Image: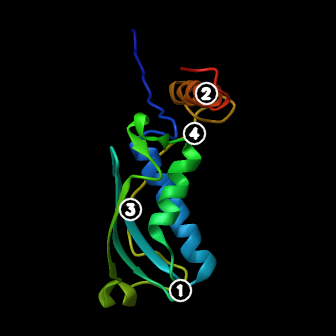
Amino acid sequence: MYTLRMAESVTEGHPDKIADQIADALLDEFLKKDPYSRVSLEIMVTTGLVIVGGELSTESYVDIPRVARNVIKDIGYTRPELGFDADTCAVIQSIDEQSPEIALGISAEGAGDTAIVVGYASKEAPNLMPWPITLAHKITKRISEYRKIGNFP
């Protein structure tokens, strides 16, 4: 029997990856300034626009547009003709203080979200991931490397 297995891997310039990197950078910045920060942010990225929304509880101030633009700049979106430019993109914020109900339900080390995550290890590749995703990640990593050194259109 023939089985076709597929996987997708995207580079750091994909909107979902940009959003992930902005979320990571913001969390790092909040925790660096206030280790007790509670940060629950959602990021949306589209052409020329970043939306940061959610709620948080912190004693620190983080310049959210600056952090978002630095991430975008580090990725390489530095020219308007690319359709997304770190210096000119809009960054919209809609952030509320964490609700008291959620704050009460969180321990000092816990998180406010719950999730069920299912995954598995595989002997198909040395990294214990299935071959399709292993190969997809290797291809996108190489594409990214070539783009960064200027050998890829």
Mark 2 nearby-residue class (10 Å; few <14, some 14–19, many ≥20)? few
**Residue 104 visible at all:** yes
Mark 1 and 3 residues: CB-CB less than 8 Å, in contact?
no
Residue 146 lies, in percent from the top left, at 64, 25
Q: Which mark is residue 139?
A: none
Mark 1, mark 2: which one is toward the viewer?
A: 2
* Residue at image point 46% right, 69% down: 64
Q: Which coloring applies here?
A: rainbow
Q: Amino acid at mark 4?
A: Ala
Q: Which mark is residue 138?
A: 2
From the image, tell me which residue sits under label 1. 108
The disc, 3 or 2, on the residue closer to the chain's N-terminal end is: 3
Mark 4 nearby-residue class (10 Å; few <14, some 14–19, many ≥20)? few
Decide if residue 117 is on the left or right side of residue 76.
left
* Residue at image point 31% right, 85% down: 99
The disc, 4 or 1, on the residue closer to the chain's N-terminal end is: 1
Residue 24 lies, in percent from the top left, at 53, 60
Closer to the camera in the image, 62 or 17: 62
* Residue at image point 65% right, 30% down: 145
From the image, tell me which residue sits under label 3. 115
